[in-house]
Image (cartoon, helix red, strand yellow):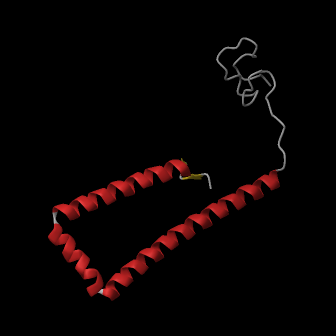
Amino acid sequence: MEELFGVPTQQLMWILLAVFGASALILGLSALRNRVSFRMAARNLPRRRTQTILVVLGLMLATMLFSASFTTGDTLTNSLRVQSLENLGQVDVQVQADGCPRGSPSRWQGCFCSGCGSCPSRSRPAG
């Protein structure tokens, strides 16, 4: 997988790493500034083991579901693309209307180029 939502994965990795680093730095600084709140939060982890385990398992499950959905979407996209290319085969024919070297959509609609000089008149042919 080279891209995710049109963003190269290498660039996405560095951006997410920077966001994680900034978040960890802010968390560390807030723990140093307000030690009482940090101690209260850290003390609750071993006291409420069931709640802590449930929260960690929920986060792990959510991460797994996101990863599985992205993987499934990429696999389906690739499979459909490969199948459609196999069904089309090689396409090497170019269709061009008569009369205009730039390829007007239809000779009945006249030439839509911007006055190239070699096109027939812009009016509809009679009969």
Compare residues 70 and 120 and report the one nearer the observer: 70
123, above or below 43, in the image: above
| Residue at 60% over, 63% down | 73
| Residue at 81% over, 25% down | 98
109, above or below 67, in the image: above
Could you tell me which quadrant the C terminus lies in?
A: top right
Compare residues 111 and 42 and report the one nearer the observer: 42
- Horizontal side, residue 60 vs residue 70: left or right: left
118, above or below 27, in the image: above
Percent position of residue 90, x then y: 84, 45
Q: Quadrant of residue 55?
A: bottom left
Residue 8 visible? The answer is no
- Residue found at the very far top of the displayed protein: 117
- Horizontal side, residue 88 vs residue 46: left or right: right
Percent position of residue 119, x then y: 75, 16
| Residue at 79% over, 30% down | 96
Residue 13 visible? The answer is yes
Percent position of residue 81, x then y: 71, 55
Could you tell me which quadrant the N terminus lies in?
A: bottom right
All told, the count of numbered labels is 0
Compare residues 42 and 109 and report the one nearer the observer: 42
Percent position of residue 86, x then y: 81, 55
